């Protein structure tokens, strides 16, 4: 019996030693602070854009750790992975917003559009709760996370029309002047 108990205790310690302990779940406030720190470090003109991945995420951890104890306790790679998930989710939500914005239902308020986009996002991601609202509000003004403008197509069409008008005017002004071969032009100048 002693040998069985000894082997049981060895199995328990070996299985516990092989397990990786999971950290606690991310709070919405920690997610928001991670996004704020990502923006701050990304735009830091002193550090610049010539940073390797480790230095960049270590700087984010240092920045976020000043304001959030939860982030201070996490590994640097955990921050990078979490931001990657948040970035993907915010981008997906932006895509839902763009889709809803293009639909243009009459009488629909902007809050209705946001709610429709939230519902679409939750359905596509199979989530029950919309947990990225703070992150979206923080990241929405960054170029990477902006809703694509449908006005871009309109601007291009207007520019094309302006170019066509200019070309027509140029063609009309050229057509008004009689064009003669060089010999005729020389003869005409002698007559006058």
Image (tube, rainbow, N blue to C red):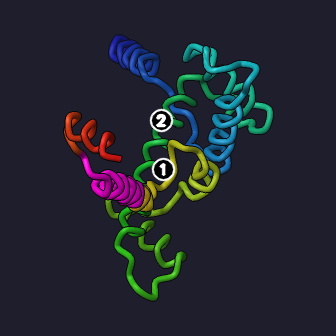
User: Which badge, 2 or 1, comes first in the chain's sequence?
Assistant: 2
In the depicted view, which residue is nearer to us: 167 or 79?
167
Question: In the rendered view, does 32 fall on the left or right side of 11?
Answer: right
Q: Quadrant of residue 137?
A: bottom right
Residue 170 forms part of the magenta stretch:
yes
User: What mark, if any, has residue 107 been given in the picture?
Assistant: none
Q: Residue at x 43, y 23 (%)?
A: 19
Question: In the rendered view, does 116 fall on the left or right side of 55?
Answer: left
Q: Position of residue 133 (x, y in %)?
A: 57, 58
Q: Position of residue 100 (x, y in %)?
A: 39, 69
Q: Quadrant of the N terminus?
A: top left
Q: Position of residue 145 (x, y in %)?
A: 51, 47
Q: Which residue is mark 2?
A: 84
* Outermost front residue: 191
Judge whether residue 153 can be spotted in this image.
no
Q: Residues within 10 Å of mark 2 (few under 14, many from 20)?
A: few
The magenta region covers 157-179
Q: Which residue is mark 1?
A: 90
Is label 2 in a helix, a strand or a loop? helix
Q: Position of residue 120 (x, y in %)?
A: 36, 66
């Amino acid at each position: 019996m002693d040998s069985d108990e000894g082997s049981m205790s060895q199995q328990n310690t070996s299985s516990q030693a092989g397990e990786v302990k999971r950290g606690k779940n991310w709070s919405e406030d920690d997610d928001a602070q991670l996004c704020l720190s990502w923006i701050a470090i990304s735009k830091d003109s002193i550090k610049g854009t010539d940073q390797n991945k480790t230095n960049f995420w270590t700087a984010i951890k240092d920045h976020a750790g000043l304001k959030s104890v939860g982030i201070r306790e996490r590994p640097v790679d955990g921050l990078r992975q979490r931001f990657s998930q948040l970035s993907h989710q915010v981008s997906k939500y932006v895509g839902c917003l763009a889709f809803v914005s293009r639909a243009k239902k009459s009488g629909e308020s902007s809050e209705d559009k946001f709610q429709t986009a939230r519902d679409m996002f939750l359905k596509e991601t199979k989530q029950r709760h919309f947990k990225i609202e703070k992150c979206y509000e923080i990241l929405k003004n960054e170029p990477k996370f902006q809703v694509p403008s449908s006005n871009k197509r309109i601007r291009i069409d207007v520019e094309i029309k302006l170019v066509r008008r200019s070309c027509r005017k140029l063609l009309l002004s050229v057509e008004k002047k009689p064009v003669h071969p060089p010999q005729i032009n020389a003869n005409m100048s002698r007559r006058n």
